[in-house]
Image (cartoon, rainbow, N blue to C red):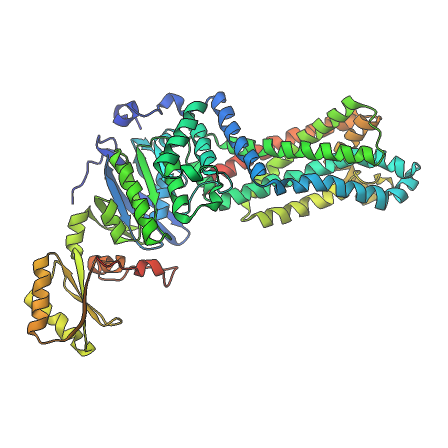
Amino acid sequence: MSATTAPVTATTAPGTADDARIPLRGHVRHTGALVRRNLLWIRQDPESMFDALLMPVVFTLLFVYVFGGSIGQALGGGQDGYVQYVIPGMIAMMSMTLSQGVGTGFSQDFNSGVMDRFRSLPIGRGSVLFAKIAVEMVRMLFATAVLMIVAVLVGFDIDHWAGLFAAVGLSAVFASSIMWVFLTLGVILKNAQSVQAMGFLVLFPLQFGSSIFAPPQSMPGWLQAFTDYNPLSTLADAARGLMVGGPVAHDLWITLGWSVAITAVMAPVAIHKFRTKS
Amino acid sequence: MKRIDDNPSAADAAVTVRGLVKHYGETKALDGVDLDVREGTVMGVLGPNGAGKTTLVRILSTLLAPDAGRAHVAGYDVVRQPRQLRRVIGLTGQYASVDEKLPGWENLYMIGRLLDLPRGEARARADELLERFSLTDAGKRPAATYSGGMRRRLDLAASMIGRPQVLFLDEPTTGLDPRTRNEVWDEVKRMVGDGVTVLLTTQYMEEAEQLASELTVVDRGQVIAKGGIEELKAKVGGRTLRVRPADPLHLRPLAAHLDELGITGLASSTVDTQRGAVLVPILSDEQLTAVVGAVTARGITVASITTELPSLDEVFLSLTGHRASAPQDPAPADTREEVAV
């Protein structure tokens, strides 16, 4: 509309052409309000934290006591050696599994009317997505804390505290990039069940076809080729290096590279899909 | 029918729609809709399921992009100025658009913050609106525990947080029982009293009559009638007198007799063979009396006589000569609903 036909109401309306763009503070405020909403969900429904609480316990016990003995023997360190091997990998694995929740939660929002409300409000489209990621990070940190408690109970030695925090941070960074993928699935797919099913199909081979649970040396060549390029392997290897010592730099950079690349591609896709969803 | 100036910035037009088109594949949800809502008035958009009402509201509230045509709300273009537009509208969807897991108060506070109210003001506004919509006691409970009417009231309260200039109500009472419907109507009337412009979609003639001053009737994505509510009511006969003769054989002769005498309203009487009644559109009590007199004079025994507001079906029958079409939905229970006066 040209300036000459500027609407009369615009003089009284809070929105003029100038504040059509949302300032950074506005984005922060909106994201904050939506984070509060998602945190209140947890308070309203504490059972939604069960997966973050139980998964680290179940998986740690399963891998250490069921597979730990034999894999550890092959590694040459017995079960105790396997604990040192698998716990850093578990941090990587769990951050992946939990990042799925961001997609299923998002899909549920779409199937209730509340998303229409958000989309009819003058807020940046990214805010809704950022808030989801922020809350999922909280769940992830909670789960990691539980994991570390269980890890120490089954005999994990924390030698490098700084390395531990760095490994957790790296997992969080990588997971945040994967969350954009799940947010996109959450927008595209019809319901939470399909998001979960799809997430499982994507994550399961990535998690197990990696160096998370066992060293790839014993795997057939074609699978080794896959695990070498699997970003979860590099994430697990970097976490292992940071937490128990060993070479880090190479895997660290590759993991960060993957994170940046995935975010650069998938964040705009997710926001675009969200904006244009009817 | 008064045609409002084509200039979308006309001072008294809160909503202007010109040639709006939205197709979903073969389905023409909107097929060239024109609409004007004057500031401070309530426009009722009446039509059956699948007429395009919800599509219209979704386009006007920037949730959906039109395929063609233009639309302005409070002077802002729905396609080019969505952000400014979102600041001045309120939306209550067909399905309550509140977060059911959050308590009522938290829903309102969150929306206040999303509308950039400072914390204190958002808090005060949440308290104030809970009070106004009689939800203060339920404010701390999750909305999932609310009754249908409470949820709808919370939804209305949420739409009012930003003191909108234009409010879109998409079938605000569909699925509510009559008592709750009345509650919602009262709230909407209060909002209108505050000077808000309202665009209301509905399937009920009674709802349109209660709330709207002007009416646009839509069918299959097209406007089939528009005008003042009295004007349209007169067109369809203000009220409908339903005369059921004891002997169904008297149906057609009776209808013919009434038309001959010319004591019906603007439309002629119709025969509802299914329910064995003659439907006579009437404009006044005098006509009612005349009809009763004519029936008596003819010596026809009558099983019942009732007056009703015209149902959506009857409105359509009078306006278009065909029944309300509901292509995807063969038997929508609520379009058949009739309300006795």
What x and y, as percent, mark residue B249?
18, 78
Q: Quadrant of residue B166?
A: top left
What x and y, as percent, mark residue A12?
29, 24
What x and y, as percent, mark residue A238?
77, 29
Q: Is residue B78 visible?
A: no
**B282 versus B10 height, above or below:** below
What x and y, as percent, mark residue B58?
38, 42
Q: Split into 4 quadrants, where in the image is the C terminus of chain B?
A: bottom left
Say left or right for B82 vs B249.
right
Q: Quadrant of residue B306?
A: bottom left
**A261 versus B32 height, above or below:** above
Say left or right for A145 vs B177.
right
Q: Identify the residue shown where x is 75% and y is 40%.
A: A57
Q: Is residue B255 visible?
A: yes
B133 vs A168, nearest the viewer: B133
A141 vs B234, nearest the viewer: A141
Q: Split into 4 quadrants, where in the image is the N terminus of chain B?
A: top left
B66 vs A125, nearest the viewer: A125
Say left or right for B66 vs B232.
right
Q: Identify the residue shown where x is 82% and y is 27%.
A: A158
**B300 versus B332 height, above or below:** below
Total labels drawn = 0
